[in-house]
Every structure is written in structure tokens, then in C-alpha cells.
Image (cartoon, rainbow, N blue to C red):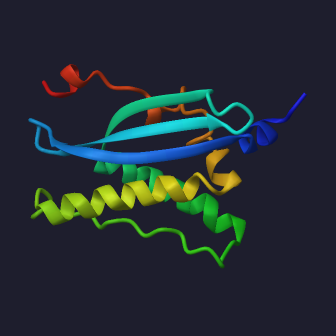
Amino acid sequence: MTSPRERGADLARFYTVTEPQRHPRGYTVYKVTARVVSRRNPEDVQEIIVWKRYSDFKKLHKELWQIHKNLFRHSELFPPFAKGKVFGRFDETVIEERRQCAEDLLQFSANIPALYNSKQLEDIKSHPFFTPVDWAELMR
């Protein structure tokens, strides 16, 4: 019987953050694609697509930063995150910076067992961050 940690090491994680969209309620959402591939059986791929706001990423960044800080892995620079803005948040450069920071955060976490095994990311099927949202409902 393998432990959750050992099972986690048997999986490769890949994340992309794409397609920023302006929501009618005045914020931007980003398409997050999470792919989890079995190293033992590369045809075994789980893919989940969700839409998330900047505030969701900011919260995840704070939680993962705290975990990383407690690991005392100072040789690894935890990826910085885009600062919040009230004015200019719909500028293309701001949206792209946020998208890139979100993707960097997820990719960074995919390589550190304490992060990808954390309650925030361990089970992408059940954690609220990866709960799929009905796009039609989201756009109302």
C-alpha cells in the first residue's frame, strides 16, 4: 500500500492559466487548466478546467507562501504575486501580469511535495479552488 505522499510523487502536474475574460460584474476571470499525469501510465491523464478570479489566486498565493515559508527552503525564491489595483486593473498589461503570476505560482507548486500535497492543491477534484464553475452561470 502506498502513502499519499508516494502516490503524489507518481504524478506529474501541469497548469496553464489562459483566456482572461471580463465578467459583467466588473472583474476578470482566468481559465485554469490543471492536468495530472501518471508517471507510471502516461495515458492516465486527469484534466480539470475552472475559471478563477484574481482574488482566488491571491488567496492561494498567501496560503502556499505560508506553507513554503515554514519549510525553511530559502534557496528557492517563492514566486512574487501581482499587487492588487483598483484603477487600471483592466489594462492589458495588468491582466497579463496577473495571468503570468498565477501560472508561475501553480507551476512552482507542482514541483514541491509540501505544496502539491497541501490541502490547497492535493486533491484537485475536491478542493474549492478547483471546483468547476458553470460558465453560463458565471457570466450572468
Query: Residue at coordinates 53% horizontally, 69% vertically from top-left?
Result: 78
Query: Residue at coordinates 58% horizontally, 44% vertically from top-left?
Result: 13
Q: Vertically, is 9 above or below 123? A: below
Left or right relative to 128: residue 45: right
- The spot of residue 86 in percent (x, y) is 14, 61
Where's the N terminus, which quadrant? top right
Query: Residue at coordinates 86% horizontally, 32% vertically from top-left?
Result: 2
Q: Vertically, is 126 above or below 100? A: above
Q: Residue furthest bottom?
A: 75
Where's the C terminus, which quadrant? top left
Count of numbered labels shown in the rendering: 0
Left or right relative to 53: residue 121: right
- The spot of residue 59 in percent (x, y) is 42, 51
- The spot of residue 117 in percent (x, y) is 67, 44
- The spot of residue 73 in percent (x, y) is 69, 72
Q: Vertically, is 139 above or below 121? A: above
- As rendered, which of 34 and 138 lies closer to the eye? 34
Left or right relative to 95: residue 45: right
Query: Residue at coordinates 63% horizontally, 52% vertically from top-left?
Result: 115
Q: Quadrant of residue 44?
A: top right
Q: Vertically, is 50 above or below 111? A: above
Q: Quadrant of residue 9?
A: top right
Left or right relative to 48: residue 122: right
